[in-house]
Image (cartoon, helix red, strand yellow):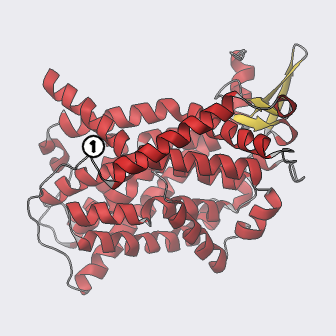
Amino acid sequence: MMNKVLSGLAEGWWMFFDTFWALIFGFVISGVIQALVSRKKMQSLLGDHSARTIVRASTFGAVSSSCSYAASALAHSIFKKGADFTASMVFMFASTNLVIELGIVLWLLIGWQFAAAEFVGGAVMIFLLQALIPRIAPPERATISSMASDQDEPTTSSVRGKISASAGYTIGDFIMLRWELIAGFIVAGLAMKVVPFSFWRALFISGHGFWSSVENAIIGPFLAFISFVCSVGNVPLAAALWSAEISFGGVIAFIFADLISLPLVLIYRKYYGTKFAIKLTLIFWFVMSLSGVITEVIFQLLKTIPSHQGMAMGTKHFGLNATTILNGVALVLALFIFYFYKNLPAQEISEFAQDPICQMQVRKSDAPASHLSDGVMYYFCMDGCKESFIKNQVSPEN
């Protein structure tokens, strides 16, 4: 058992290694948007959920190419900047499901049909999101207090100040999500190495035609939820599920479901509150499952669903390959960001504050929430953090 645990921890480490560059790039892009992009500009680009805007959000998301954790932070930041909530969610889905690197990994581990299904199913999900979110969770109900200020925020006065402000938002986002990230990678590794694969296979039924496909597509996201899979890290498990003769649509639904793993649901809770996070998760689950079924039907009609066969698991980590090179670049970028985070120009320090609950950086002029206590004004990233501060009388560490 100890060997299995150690193997699971190692697997979690390699998942982190494989997605490190995407995490860094995603958080950095999020920090830059929060620091430099005005609400007015964001509203002009993604201010509604028209067909043209949804296409634009999908394109921006595919180009941003983030892992699920970074994508959630990025979608939250553009929503705060004035983007329509539906467009923000489409952006988040596109940045994890319409990306080239995921398609390449799918092609290599399972086959080109799954790579093609990623994009077909991703388009189906975006269509469903545009149709459902405005009706089930309209923007006026989803808009949190971070949209309270209608004034365009000020910008820092120097290039160094702008870089430092971006670095502050980047590090703040990472600090806020650090425990969810750690838990996600550890549990994902343990789920793959410690839990018997027979357990995962027993969750799915077979031999009942279309109804088996429906059940598999429903259970696929549930498996992603309990196994804490993340982004590209779920592809090896998806390949194993396909080898265990899980339906094509069930595997596709599982691949899409990295956005409802438990750590992500906890992140949504921090961003939007408990009730809305539950509602949002259920919407995502429905969209992912239905997209899996629809994608399977499409590929059945095209007669392109591959036959089940054993998969050679395992990927190359260290070495002269794209992942190692990108991780090296990301590490340099992370050190660069940390330096500017620790050396914010004195004239810019007074413009920002740190949420005493989640440690996220906020701009004082348009902070989502604030509270005066014992003559000291505290600033928060959302009402939830403010309420937690008041309820528990938490004092900031810094």
- Residue at 26%, 61% in the rendered image: 251
Residue 370: x %, y % from top left: 83, 31
- State left or right for residue 295 relative to residue 24: left
- Residue 297 place in picture, x, y as percent: 29, 78
Viewer-closest of 71 and 387 = 71
Q: Which is nearer the eye, 134 or 53? A: 53
Q: Residue at x 37, y 40 (%)?
A: 16
- Please report the residue visible at 69 percent of the width from the left and 52 percent of the height from the top: 33
The N terminus sits in image quarter: top left
Q: Circle 1 sits on which residue?
A: 318
- What is the x, y in percent for residue 249? 28, 67
Is 252 displayed left or right of 42 in the figure? left
Helix, strand or loop at mark 1: loop
On screen, residue 365 versus residue 210, left or right, reads: right
287 w.r.t. 188: above or below: below
Other residues around mark 1 within 10 Å, as few (<14) / some (14–19) / many (≥20):
few
Q: Quadrant of residue 112?
A: bottom left
**Residue 143 percent coordinates (x, y):** 72, 52
Residue 237 visible, this orientation = yes
Disc 1 marks a residue whose amino acid type is Phe
